[in-house]
Amino acid sequence: MGQRKRVNVQSPVPCPSETQPFSPHTHSSTEIPHHTHAFNTSGHHGYLQSGKHSICMVSDFFYPNMGGVESHIYQLSQCLIEKGHKVVIATHAYGERRGVRYLNNGLKVYYLPLQVMYNQSTATTCFHSLPLLRCVFVRERITVVHAHSSFSAMAHDALFHAKTMGLNTVFTDHSLFGFADLSSVLTNKLLTVSLCDTNHIVCVSYTSKENTVLRAALNPDIVSVIPNAVDPTDFTPDPSCRDSSKITIVVVSRLVYRKGIDLLGGIIPELCAKHPDLCFLIGGEGPKRLVLEEVREKYQLHDRVRLLGALDHKDVRDVLVQGHIFLNTSLTEAFCMAIVEGASCGLQVVSTRVGGIPEVLPDELVTLCEPTVSSLCVGLEKVIARQRAGKVPSPAAIHRQVQTLYTWRNVAERTEKVYDHACRQPVLPLPARLRRLRSHCGAVAGSIFSFVAVINFLFLLFLQWLFPNHLIDVAVDASGPGGRWGRGFGKEESKDPIVARCAVEDTRRLKC
Amino acid sequence: MVLKIFFPRCCNMADSGLLVGRWIPGHDSAVVLAVIHYPFIPGHVKKYLSELRSQIQVDLTVLGSWSLSKDGQKEMDGFLKDLSTIFPHSRWLQLSREPGKKGFACEVVRKNGHAPPSGEEDKIIFVHYDQRKVMLSQLHPIHENGADVESSELRAVFHTVSQSEPLFLLDKYDDGPLKLTHWQSDGREASIIVELIKQVSVPVCILLTSLVCWWKWLWSFRVLNIWPVPFISSKLSTCVQAGYRTDHFQTVFSTRKATTHMDFMKKANMFVSFFVDIALGLLLISWLYRENRISQLANTLVPAADHVAKELQELLEWLMGAPAGLKMNRALDEVLGRFFLYHIHLWISYIRLMSPFIEMILWYVGLSACLGLTFALSVLSDIVALLTFHIYCFYVYGARLYCLKIYGLSSLWRLFRGKKWNVLRQRVDSCSYDLDQLFLGTLLFTILLFLLPTTALYYLVFTLLRLVVVMFQGLIHLSVDFINSFPLFAMGLRICRPYRLSEGVKFCVLHEEPGAPLHLLMEINPLQCSSVLQCYRTETSGCSSRDSWLALCKKLFVGELIYPWRQKTTKTD
Amino acid sequence: MGADSDAGASPAVPWRKVLYERQPFPDNYVDRRFLEELRRNIRVRRYSYWAVVRETGLVSQQLSCVALFLTLWSYMEQGNVGPLTLLWTGLGCSVLGYTLYEALGGGIDRERTRCADLQSAAVFMAFTFGFSPVLKTLTESVSTDTVYAMSAGMLIAHLASFPYTQPSLPGSLSLNAALFASVCLASRLPGTLHTFAMLSCALLVFALWPCLLQRLRHTAEWTFPWAAGMVCVCGVVGVGTLWPAGALLLFLALVILTLVCPLLLVRLQRHKDNIHGPWDEAEISDDLSRFLS
């Protein structure tokens, strides 16, 4: 009776590769496969003609990891998508989270199966990530590769491969480094190699720029300063949450040495002895928690020093608004988001004068101290006295002042200019690149990395012979000009409740 | 939208009539269960359906009409339309089939009487199913509580068909007011016999249950619960096995009817494995008690035990020399060697004392096989444990000594580095010791370090011996566990009636023609064998928690005692 | 802020190093004041040659102590010195040292009573004496080379982990390593009494002498170079009586340690080029342990 064409219901419905990681297991046999290839007329040059870019952000650090770099990448990508650019993110696989995922507004994230070595950073061999990253760059028709964080091996790898493939490159440095010890000498050398032929570099503060220029021996003209931003709607003041019978000092940071927790351990007994109505609210987790616990035990301050443990990013605001004073004891900081968040919640901010912190907030919003216990105590006492006398501006006023300072739209605008600038610059061909490496990075390292660059180039040629570019499927654009998100593709996908829920959930966790 | 109609294959060629079935709530699909033939009286149909509804708890309705058009039945059309007014429903299906054609024609009439505008016309898919298989099959994974039944469309279809069993009991030869077409059982007689057996089994069950109760009551005596008895019985695998079998026995012969599928399968599995076990046991007895095999066994057992003791003695003497060229501490070596030799001496005299009675013991013990092969194996395991008691003793001495050394060395090594273990914080703290503490600690550390190889060698040798015994016992336990827990009934069902345990379905295209509804054939995917095992295995503690190899190695390294699997789980409890 | 292109325009307002203000400069603007906070070599210390020599004296004398101990051990092994001689000498030295220690520590508050000292001494004696038969047979079956290698390793560990910087008692690891080495060596000696004598001697050299030396440095600083020098001379002479070439080697090593290495340190200081700036990780200068002790 009729021809027997088998359709097995248990096997997932064949769908475009984009949706593969989501593929829900449904029983219904009536699911019609989505149309796979319908559009994509705009080719590689379409982006340049339209003045829009196709950007690939690469970093080891992305959601589900949480931190400054992660939220920077996410927020910047969202604003760039809003401005009509196409953005995809490449990071390494986090546990079960591997493959392709979509976040809000068609932000596509590639979780590539690369081996994590240490501290969420991947291992680097300069070569093994080339096949995967090339595949991403080609199928997404990337024009600009934007790498983040000098701690991320994957970012450096991506820069290296992008230059081999002739793509424009931009790098954002989020951290400061010293020059004193052996490890920093080595990392600085690697940074020199990685950045010597990168088209443009972005730093988050002027101090960070000076640091990067010195470390990588760069021409300061190709380094732009674009600060981080804070979403002011996430950090709104709420004075009703405060306990007006006492003065609360809030500290929110990871409890590690670099955040100056040892200083905090000295400040707590000093101030608690002088001011009986003072209490501390400390959010965060880390190895230095022990110091704080010991101090608390020794001075019997269990009712006045509350250790909240690790905080979800969404809970930070609720902790901040409970305090009067925000204290930051960092020993080094490129751009301190925490003090902006604290000020945005209407708190008086006391901070150490290190790194780029003096550039971040105007003097009337922050009290800067030297990184010693005595100086911090003096600064805090000054603010406490002002608070007692009621001579501080209202939280709402502080919030109003802060909310215009740093916005992601502004960051995206300035980053866009960096992309325009970078795309106008030529990408060095291999001979010029080798000359530059040799002349710029010293004889030994220059020669070694010239050799590596040549091998990488040969490897690329081999890959191009093995899988020619034109055989790699071009991906459906979710964002950018001709993006399908919210127009058919996205709608059809969000019809599937599981997918939609996943995407919404991911976004919620990321935003908070 | 797509309208799916699940249609039984047995009704393909049925005479014209009414379609009886159910609309699946929440989904756009209908299950056809039977066809009621003309002529009928609408009042009878309604009465019959309402009776059925209250009986099977499924919302049965008249779905529409079915016409297998013979020649000249065009005038039926008007009549069919009229029918829809008699049995009101929001949608009315009109299926019709012409003899020569493969496909059906279908028309959906809305409540207001006319077909919907052509633009919104529903696409219709016919899914043909085998009524008997679907009725009998159990969809996996199983959700026992009914709440979840409605969630999935497929599950709802299976549920509807299996619940409608009373509908299918109506025989076509019955002289009722209604004539129906649906699947019908062929073997009425067999089912009568099954019913009879069920009736008979009830008093048997009551009898056996009371026996088990009596047995349990015997065990609940106070005398048997004072200290050493529970301890020893938990270490003897025969007692453990007896406990299992009592539990199984109680479950199988309880007079309570198995309500859910899982209960039923559990009982059936236990019964079959019990049966097979006893059959194997009897087979063993018939082999063992023929041709004087018992005495042969006894005659080889005693010299074997003797021989093992001799070998051990030689091994110890070898260890007391310079084994494998290793340089050991002479004094400690001597002490340990003598200690163990004395034990072997004790053991040999014990064996000699026992030897006249071995045969008699074996004869009585062999009878236990009539309780099942698993009992015989458990007894064998216990006998092995008793006969290798000296090895166990050696192992325990060696392990305790070694453990002590390792423990002492690790804490003295911390002292050596100027650290100490902080018990409150569960971490290593630095600590400043006094000069005399340091001096004494280092002295002891040096002594322990130099004596460690000697102890470690003794420990290693005896651990290897112990591992051999444990491995043998473990093998026996594994086979006992296998017989205890293997779901024989479920496996047999899977092999002989694969559709009974299903894991989803697959569809084949039967007939596809543009403009006409699509016809699919629904076939049942049998459950995979591994899933059968996973789903229906009887839980026994022996297999449920097994330590990983890494954990075992770690235990061996630090000198913790190891036991065969079953004892270990009782220990962790 | 502004685009990269309008860099040529010269705005009237001066550039400020702040991020919170939108300034009429491009993002990649480089001001005259770029890197003005860069500092070089701010934390370089100028060393005086003789002060460094004085400090390295401690290292030299510790090395000599080890040499001295090894000399004593070989004398014992060859039977040139009897255990009783060594014991009596040791007793004399310890009584002398203890008196000196007490005399120098007159001004300091005593944490330990003399009774505790006596008790410690009794514990040393009793346990060493009790264990020496065990110790004697301990390494019997271990090959001599292994014992030597182990002792050498442990003595090197002792020298490497000796707390030269902080003026304190010998650290746990260094003292333990030295004691381990001396137990290994002592177990190679011909008799039980030899073992006992050798261990007592090790206690004197590795545990008690550093305490005395530290007290010397603390209260009567002028004596320290003399004491160190004396130990060095003793060590060289001691090794010389057994193995002249070894004495020469030791002498050279001591000279390099005390005279050449400090010279190198002082000379190489000149070539130091350290960059500092606001990006440096701040160092915590307070003594934070006072809050917890």
Image: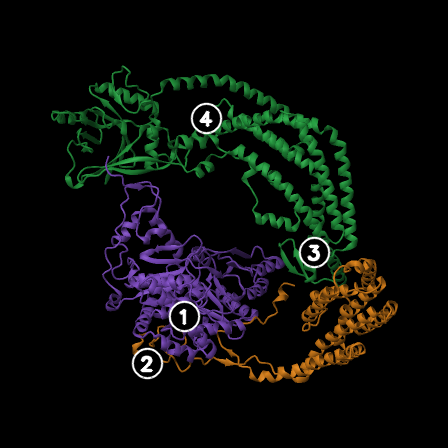
Colour orange belongs to chain: C
Q: Is residue B557 above or below residue B228?
A: below
Badge number at residue B258: 4
Residue A317 location (% of width, % of height): 43, 57
Q: From this viewpoint, is residue A119 visible?
A: no
Label 2 neighbourhood size at 10 Å, few (<14), some (14-19), many (20+)?
few
Badge number at residue A455: 1
Question: Residue tagged by mark 2?
Answer: C11
Nearer the observer: mark 2 or 4; the answer is: 4
Colour purple belongs to chain: A
Closer-to-camera residue (A443/C218): A443
Question: Residue tagged by mark 3?
Answer: B409
Residue A106 location (% of width, % of height): 31, 57
Nearer the observer: mark 1 or 3; the answer is: 1
Q: Callout 1, which amino acid?
A: Ile
Residue drawn at x 27%, y 51% as measured from the top left: A491
The local secondary structure at tag 1 comes to: helix
Q: Report, in whole angstroms, how far the alpha carbon at label 2 lies from the one at label 3.
A: 75 Å
Name chain B's colour: green
Q: Report, in whole angstroms, how far the alpha carbon at label 4 lies from the one at label 1.
A: 71 Å
Q: Which chain carries label 1?
A: A
Q: Callout 4, which amino acid?
A: Ala
Q: Callout 3, which amino acid?
A: Leu
Label 3 neighbourhood size at 10 Å, few (<14), some (14-19), many (20+)?
many
Left or right of A285 in this view: B383: right
